[in-house]
Amino acid sequence: MGRLYLLPILGLLIGVILGLVLRVDIPSVYVPYLGIALLAALDSAFGGLRASLEGKFNDKLFISGFFGNTLMAAFIVYIGDRLGIPLYLAAVVAFGVRLFQNLALIRRLIFQSRGWG
Amino acid sequence: MNEARRFLSPILVCLILGFLLSTAFYAQQRTRERVGQRKAELIEIIKSLEKERENLKKETRKLRERLRAYEKEAAAHEGILGSFTKELEELKFAAGLTAVKGTGVEVSLGDALQVPPGEDPNNYIIHDYDLRVVVNALWDGGAEAIAINNQRLVSTSAIRCAGNTILVNSMRLATPYKIRAIGNSERLYRALQENKDASKLLWNYAKSFGLIAKIKTLSHIKIPAYSGSLRVEHARAIKGED
């Protein structure tokens, strides 16, 4: 029972394999959208990991954040594209900064929980 | 069971995340492959076309030589044809279809060796219009024949830009460019000095941007004959008018 936390990692692996096997053909026009959506998804995933380490994990918040951020990011890229403003840069910067912050916090939490420092 | 259900949403999210990851990876790889392939194809096409042109040029040269031999032979036999042939030779000489030699000048133009960071690189390279300025100044100074990197300029020649190379007679030329002109050396040199654009390029810009610009007066220059096509397809002469 103690190794249940490996299940999400297993899910990740299955997802990767699924993507490699299915080889979904995305038109090159939509590749930037995919990239930003991916970044948002990564951000949400790390956010969720951090929340669970802090003991504040909320199922509904996590799911809604994941899908909401991902869709919102793709939408921002779309709007920027239409207006001729490189708004995707804002998404990249915002998600990038948050990703690093979350990673730093996760590192700190793991250190604390193990009593390493 | 309750324990396992807590992990349901992370599992789902991780699954989607993994799927997005590999899909993005695959899409990116495919785009890169496609671009590389297209580039390679285009390079192949250009190479084969250039080869074809080389062959055609060789053939043109051969055919012109044969034509000349026929003309000579005919001239030796008949008087009236002889005078025609002489006239033909003169016209060919004027049209740039024969190699010529004489006194003249050579203008060397080349890109600057380096572009200082933050500067517009366009200022540091030789453009098609730079060559045109010099060539026009030389014609103005009474040049009788001009060649850029041994490409003879004739009435149909064009000097134009194509990407990062300059096309003269549809041949790609690269820096440094040697513009040779036959004519009165002094007059040619003076024409370069007196032409506003040419003097600005050769003396002012060259100095401030580090472009290569050298002018030599020469007593023996050889300029090759034009070797490209002269065919006119759509235009037709009007009879009885000047």
Image (tube, rainbow, N blue to C red):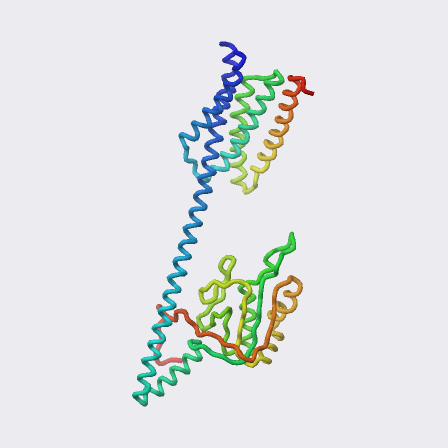
Position of B149 compared to B53: left or right? right
Residue A51 higher or lower than B67, as above or below: above
Position of A88 compared to B89: left or right? right
Residue B60 higher or lower than B79, as above or below: above
Q: Residue at x 51, y 34 (%)?
A: A35
Q: Quadrant of residue A39?
A: top right
**Residue, far front:** A116
Q: Position of residue B99 (x, y in %)?
A: 45, 77
Q: Nearer the viewer, residue A14 or B198?
A: A14
Q: Position of residue B141 (x, y in %)?
A: 56, 78
Q: How many numbered markers are drawn? A: 0
Q: Nearer the viewer, residue B127 or A63?
A: B127
Q: Residue at x 44, y 42 (%)?
A: B33
Q: Quadrant of the C terminus of chain B?
A: bottom left
**Residue, far bottom:** B79
**Residue, far right:** A117
Q: Residue at x 61, y 16 (%)?
A: A56
Q: Position of residue B29 (x, y in %)?
A: 46, 38
Q: Quadrant of residue B110?
A: bottom right
Position of A4 compared to B199: left or right? left
Q: Position of residue B180 (x, y in %)?
A: 53, 73
